[in-house]
Image (tube, coloured by chain):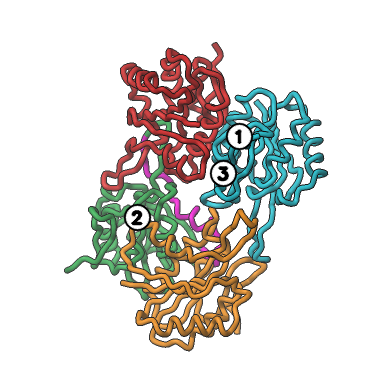
Chain colours: A red, B cyan, C green, D orange
Amino acid sequence: MKIDIFCAGGTIDKIYFDAKSDYQVGEPKVGRILEAYKLNIEFEVHSVLRKDSLEMTQEDRNTLKDAISTCPNNLILVTHGTDTMPETAETLKAITGKTIVLFGAMEPAMYKTSDAEFNAGCAVGAVQSLPEGVYISMSGRIFEAGKVKKNVAEGVFEIKES
Amino acid sequence: MKIDIFCAGGTIDKIYFDAKSDYQVGEPKVGRILEAYKLNIEFEVHSVLRKDSLEMTQEDRNTLKDAISTCPNNLILVTHGTDTMPETAETLKAITGKTIVLFGAMEPAMYKTSDAEFNAGCAVGAVQSLPEGVYISMSGRIFEAGKVKKNVAEGVFEIKES
Amino acid sequence: MKIDIFCAGGTIDKIYFDAKSDYQVGEPKVGRILEAYKLNIEFEVHSVLRKDSLEMTQEDRNTLKDAISTCPNNLILVTHGTDTMPETAETLKAITGKTIVLFGAMEPAMYKTSDAEFNAGCAVGAVQSLPEGVYISMSGRIFEAGKVKKNVAEGVFEIKES
Amino acid sequence: MKIDIFCAGGTIDKIYFDAKSDYQVGEPKVGRILEAYKLNIEFEVHSVLRKDSLEMTQEDRNTLKDAISTCPNNLILVTHGTDTMPETAETLKAITGKTIVLFGAMEPAMYKTSDAEFNAGCAVGAVQSLPEGVYISMSGRIFEAGKVKKNVAEGVFEIKES
């Protein structure tokens, strides 16, 4: 089983630069998370964007959509900033024939208390268990694209009443 | 969404007692793992057994099966030692109408390098995504009960050729 | 044995705010580090400043000096940003009758790979072992105030040739 | 500055073998702890014994003493099991002209909650700050050999009233 992982940046990849006393989106961390264990899956990491998701444009979303569309594999994970993850999920619904699961983290993967590793687990478990479609895996829940929002005040993802 | 978690012991729950310089199966750790993050799921932990899975008897497996059968919820996780997890999965196939996912860890959850947290994520993602049935979530893979074995030499779970 | 710890901010205390996607100097972390273990020392944490050390002024250094001077204890730790730690150490040399050890971290204490905990250990071991004076404990080394500099390119503290 | 580190085993080095569901004293972990950071010290690790300290004999202690005696360096750390660390410290008092600091951990270094890293920091800070002699660095305190005991019930090292 192979999973292709497309990385768009976001909090999960944020790192701290001592030299600048600054915080920036660094290289994708999901590869390191998955390499830490002896897994029985193959995966390939594609670094598409390195953006805070508040700065993502529709053009960025299209770039991501095109990159995923041309991938021959149908098991797809996407790491993404949390603030506009639901919007990107909507854009990716144009892709058919694949199971696409977006996830990210509320705290950088480099943090001791980060949810990145647990969330990566959720997404890996979900992507191989779900039918075709686009999903968000956050807060321990699998949501369908279009039916999910980030509750910023509470710091959790939840069902969006339509 | 609520998940009921039945705990049977195993490596995931092993702790070190300085007083005895010994290693024993302690209290279930899965609750602490899930409480570490702000999740949007409810869960209830049931401590059924505290055994190294090599010491589990068929009577133990029946005890576990009965405990799960009487639970009104249909989303079930089971934490279990890795050595006989496939055997227990076979026993649990007698239960119908539920999605049951077994998982554990190759290293105690107390370890810095433990796979417990990632595996818990996989199982949480899988249990809400899969149809009814009994599954094992280990090594980043979801296996159907009866079609999985532990490769002790490699330290991974893999498909059992029938 | 009691140690008084005066906190001036710096990288060691930097935290990430998801709401703002920003990085700021938070509450002192040294207390949590020391409370994590069963130690046989008493300590008291004094939060004096919360500044990136590049922003510290001579007035800030005097505030810190005055706070330490009025403390009746003679075992003193100071947590501080790394960039101007040597300058602050020079200022603190005006205090007599105390052993004062400054330390900080190259990565925030919240980071998995942070040196904060190890550095805190070095400083605790040193402060009770050294004669009166002002010292910097960084990079696993104890330096005398006035004879130390930060090598920014290498990311280590080293002896300053006079 | 160079520090020579002699390793005798103990809880700090205990590891878990999944294959045997057993717990044994493994390779010295102190090297990995010190290599994790960019330090400005040189160190050399000498693996002398791999024993639970309850099993150490006077012959073992003499072996350790001889190994340290022949080392040309005068900055010496010793990692050791906690139960008989005070006895070994007494034996090492026969060595003159060196600063020797013993330390260990109440929980294996592989544990998330281990005190190994903090204790290593304390010992590194102390060994370069103390006059010649033999010391134990545990529970955040530096004790002189012969004036220290382990309080097993409390899990801390404390001053031994003579």
Chain letter behind tag 2 = C
Pointer 3 residue: B156
Q: Residue furthest top?
A: A162
**Foreground: C39 or B143?**
B143
The amino acid pointed to by label 1 is: Ala
**Foreground: C41 or D144?**
D144
Pointer 1 residue: B123
Whether labels 1 and 2 share one chain: no
The spot of residue C84 in percent (x, y) is 26, 55
Q: State yes or no: discs 3 and 1 in contact (Cβ < 8 Å).
A: no
Chain letter behind tag 1 = B
| Res. C40 image quadrant | bottom right
Q: Secondary structure at mark 3?
A: strand
Give me the C-alpha separation between circle 1 and circle 2. Answer: 43 Å
Residue at point 75% right, 51% down?
B55
Mark 1 or 2: in front is: 1
**Does the image show residue B112?**
yes
Q: Is residue C26 magenta?
A: yes
> In the rendered structure, which segment of residues is drawn in magenta?
C22-42
The amino acid pointed to by label 2 is: His
